[in-house]
Image (cartoon, helix red, strand yellow):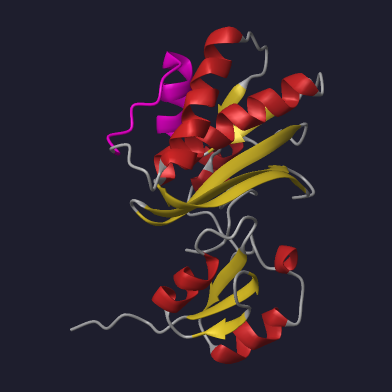
């Protein structure tokens, strides 16, 4: 029988900061804290080392990536277009604590971040991230493209609607307030930004990934 690997949680910003050995305790300390900063680590030593460092030096960091695609497949896909931004979301549970962000694809400089929200889903987060990215690029009159690794989010944006099955409650009202704003923005704005699917199998995790897998 397989056993779940132990994880340790570093909280840089929250109701309480430090290193904790339980996700339930971590969740308690970040719940309803706007701009909470946290991440899981495989060992206590790694978590404690991260605590004295900078949050942004740790999120989005993944193990070295080596594609399993053939040389021919990689050549066909090519390299990412770095005249772009990348968006992604993270959800601890489905529904669960959700957040999303957008970064410069090449430098990984964070351009915007929202959350964490008490109750959301990954699909909703991906949708909100994509619409936020479109609005961000239009506001800055940018010709950059936008990458997402979510086909669902791309489909919802095309249809200008959020097809989540998550029921609206008092707990997730802040999330659905953003969803309503996003849908309204799509219906009332034109944009010329090209939305492109991030090729995870060729390039690894999208640069906006929170690195919490």
Q: How many marks?
A: 0
**Could one spot residue 79 in this view of the protein?**
no
Asked which quadrant contains residue 87, the reply is top right
Q: Is residue 12 left or right of residue 72?
A: right
**Could one spot residue 18 in this view of the protein?**
yes
Q: Is residue 128 above or below residue 53?
A: above
- State the residue at coordinates (76%, 77%): 53
Q: Is residue 211 left or right of residue 103?
A: left
Q: Position of residue 14 (x, y in %)?
A: 61, 69
- State the residue at coordinates (69%, 86%): 49
Q: Is residue 89 above or below residue 187?
A: below
Q: Position of residue 168 (x, y in %)?
A: 32, 37
- Looking at this view, name the residue that lies furthest to the bottom: 45
Q: Which residues are magenta?
A: 150-166
Q: Is residue 26 magenta?
A: no
Q: Is residue 151 magenta?
A: yes
Q: Is residue 197 above or below residue 11?
A: above
Closer to the camera, 114 or 40? 114
């Amino acid at each position: 029988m397989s056993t779940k690997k132990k994880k340790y949680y570093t909280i840089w910003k929250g109701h309480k900061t430090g290193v904790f050995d339980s996700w339930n305790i971590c969740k308690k300390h970040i719940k309803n804290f706007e701009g909470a900063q946290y991440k899981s680590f495989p060992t206590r030593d790694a978590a404690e080392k991260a605590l004295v460092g900078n949050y942004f030096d740790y999120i989005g960091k993944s193990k070295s990536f080596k594609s399993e695609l053939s040389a021919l497949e990689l050549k066909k896909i090519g390299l990412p277009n770095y005249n772009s931004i990348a968006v992604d979301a993270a959800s601890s549970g489905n529904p669960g604590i959700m957040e999303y962000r957008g970064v410069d694809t090449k430098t990984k400089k964070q351009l915007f971040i929202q959350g964490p929200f008490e109750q959301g889903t990954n699909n909703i987060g991906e949708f909100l991230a994509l619409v936020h990215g479109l609005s961000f690029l239009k506001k800055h009159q940018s010709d950059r493209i936008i990458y997402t690794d979510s086909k669902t989010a791309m489909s919802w944006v095309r249809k200008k609607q959020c097809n989540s099955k998550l029921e609206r409650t008092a707990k997730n009202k802040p999330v659905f307030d953003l969803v309503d704003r996003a849908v309204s923005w799509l219906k009332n704005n034109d944009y010329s930004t090209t939305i492109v699917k991030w090729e995870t199998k060729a390039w690894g995790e999208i640069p906006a990934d929170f690195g919490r897998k």
